[in-house]
Image (cartoon, rainbow, N blue to C red):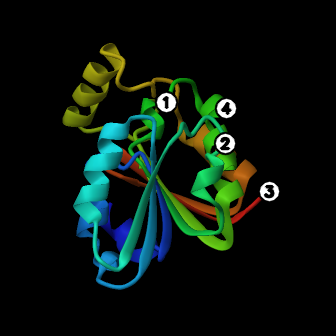
Amino acid sequence: MLDLYNQHLGHRHLEVGPGSGWYLANTTAMQPGPAHITLMDLNPTPLSFTARRIEAADRVVESVCGSVLDAVPAEAGTGYESVGINFVLHCVPGNFAEKGVAFRHLANILGDEGVLFGSTILGRRRTPRTLFGRALTAVYGRVGAFNNRDDDRDELEDALKEAFGEYSITDVGDVTLFTARRPRR
């Protein structure tokens, strides 16, 4: 996961669903130097926590409340070099035919040469999951934290293909990583 940030984090970055901000705080790509990081989440708590965690004198950190199922709020701006969306999509209701709209919204604010990168946990997999992964998915699904029962790789690929001209998908254990470039607008 950290490799995605080390390889793809740009100086102008949008982080969707920042959680605790651990990846942003620990990537080597966040070395001192000017940067503009925008955080987006429905919940203001992770926004303020992550903003405090990654603050630096030469870094602008802004926060916007918003849902990936809606257009990115105008105050977030456009022209991002990178967009990260990690461990978010398996929590969003619906299948990829419905929640794939998130990729279209993010493609609209990504710069022409920008990269979207992220991860999710698919509910339907071609490869067997680990015992821990099966247990975690089952428990989180029962309590409503995961909405990935119908998520599969083919639908993820279709959603990425609709929003981007180039993409890659890789499975690492129970996690599916993806990158996408050449936004279709």
| Quarter location, residue 132 | top left
Say if mark 1 contacts mark 4, CB within 8 Å: no
- Residue name at image x 43 percent, y 76 percent: 35
Query: Which of the marked residues, 4 or 2, is nearer the chain's N terminus?
Result: 2
Q: Quadrant of the C terminus?
A: bottom right
| Separation of marks 1 and 3 at Cα, in angstroms | 23 Å
Percent coordinates x, y for residue 84 in the rendering: 46, 58
Q: Amino acid at mark 4?
A: Ala
Q: On the image, which quarter does residue 128 sit in?
A: top left
Tell me the SS state at disc 2.
loop
Q: Which residue is mark 3?
A: 185
Q: Is residue 181 above or below residue 90?
A: below
Q: Secondary structure at mark 1?
A: loop
Task: Say if 94 sits above or below 71 in the image.
Answer: above
Q: Secondary structure at mark 3?
A: loop
Q: In the depicted view, which residue is nearer to us: 154 or 13?
A: 13
Q: How many marks?
A: 4
User: Which residue is the site of mark 2?
Assistant: 71
Q: Which mark is residue 181?
A: none
Question: Amino acid type of disc 3?
Answer: Arg
Mark found first going from the N terminus, 2 or 3: 2
Q: Which mark is residue 97?
A: 4
- 131 left or right, relative to 109: left
Nearer the camera: disc 1 or disc 2: 2
| Quadrant (top left, top right, bottom left, bottom right) of the N terminus | bottom left
Within-10-Å neighbours for mark 4: few <14, some 14–19, many 20+: few
Distance, label 4 to label 3, CA atoms, is 18 Å
